[in-house]
Image (cartoon, rainbow, N blue to C red):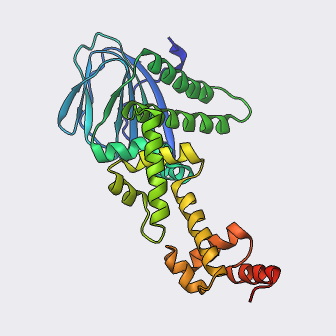
Amino acid sequence: MKKNLQTTFIPRQYMLEKHFELYYYNDSHLAGIKGHSHDYYEFYFFLEGDVSMYIEGILYELNPGDVILIPPGVRHHGVVHDEDKPYRRFVFWISKEYCSLLEGISADYVYLMRQVETTRRYIWHYDLLGLNALQSKAFQIIEEQHADRFGKNTKISLCVNDLILHLNRTVYEMEHPNTPREEQDLYQKVMLYIEDHLDEDLSLDQLAGVFFVNKYHIAHVFKENLGLSIHQFITKRRLAMCRDAILGQASITDAYLLCGFRDYSSFFRAFKKEYGLSPKEYREQVRKQTGAK
């Protein structure tokens, strides 16, 4: 199966590429390697073999369909119990720097990385359908790497990002089999809380503590329902409250401090981006239009 896409196993435990590396191994008569850790994230998709995995001193028996995520600095190594049996797996390495780049686009890309660092749960099991989908995405990347087509690097980046998001989405849905009603209820409660506490700390960590829910789950539910991130929504609501205060009797300084902004420069940039004018210009224009003093 996909024999021409196999990689000859080399016990190298460092990355040659800057952002990511993906390998498909199909070996026999292969012994395990010594315990080690590395400075990147390692996804391991187990397909076939009689193998266990030591992670931080605990031995985990593996079944076909197991997906493992090893964060940076976590010691681990595979144990091959029967070297005569075929040993098939994918190994997918992602640098910390690339994860940071993706997190800047959306926290959805690193939900799983943050989860494993918090919970120390390293293994998830995919059913046959899920495993086939995962294999298909992995082989698509490797096939593109072996090809020589226009837009090759761009296509590989798109496929890699798709694979990372797919992994995060699958595990998220495994861990949150909530009904739409439950998620809608959480969304409504978060909305009401934000409206009542716009002048206070509204970080994801704070909201997670209030609602006793993982912060990435809150972020996901909010984005799914509104199409905006929590940060974007909070900023828009604070700006609207500032606008109303500025058009009333409050000074610009009092307005931005009362509405939850911590410094004037960030408030000024956000206000001008939202309304196209500085706070002072906006107030003067509205007063001129309405004849107010």
Residue found 27% across the figure and 42% down from its top: 120
- Residue 163, compared with residue 263, is above or below; it is above
Task: Identify which residue, 204 or 239, lies in the foreground.
Answer: 239
Judge from the rendering whether residue 57 lies leftward or rightward of residue 105; answer left or right: left
> In the rendered image, is residue 153 in sight?
yes
Establish if 251 lies above or below 153: below
Q: Which is nearer the eye, 110 or 269? A: 269
Q: Is residue 289 above or below residue 106?
A: below
Q: Where is the C terminus found, in terms of image quarters?
A: bottom right
Residue at the (73%, 78%) spot, across then down: 282
Residue 179 lies, in percent from the top left, at: 43, 32
Instruction: Identify the residue at the far bottom of this view.
Output: 293
Residue 265 location in percent, x, y? 58, 79
In front: 188, or 87?
A: 188
Instruction: Report if residue 95 is visible in the image.
Output: no
In the image, taking residue 116 as reference, residue 286 lies left or right, namely right
Residue positioned 49% across, 73% down in the render: 260
Q: Please state which of residues 271 and 93 is positioned toward the viewer in this rendering.
A: 271
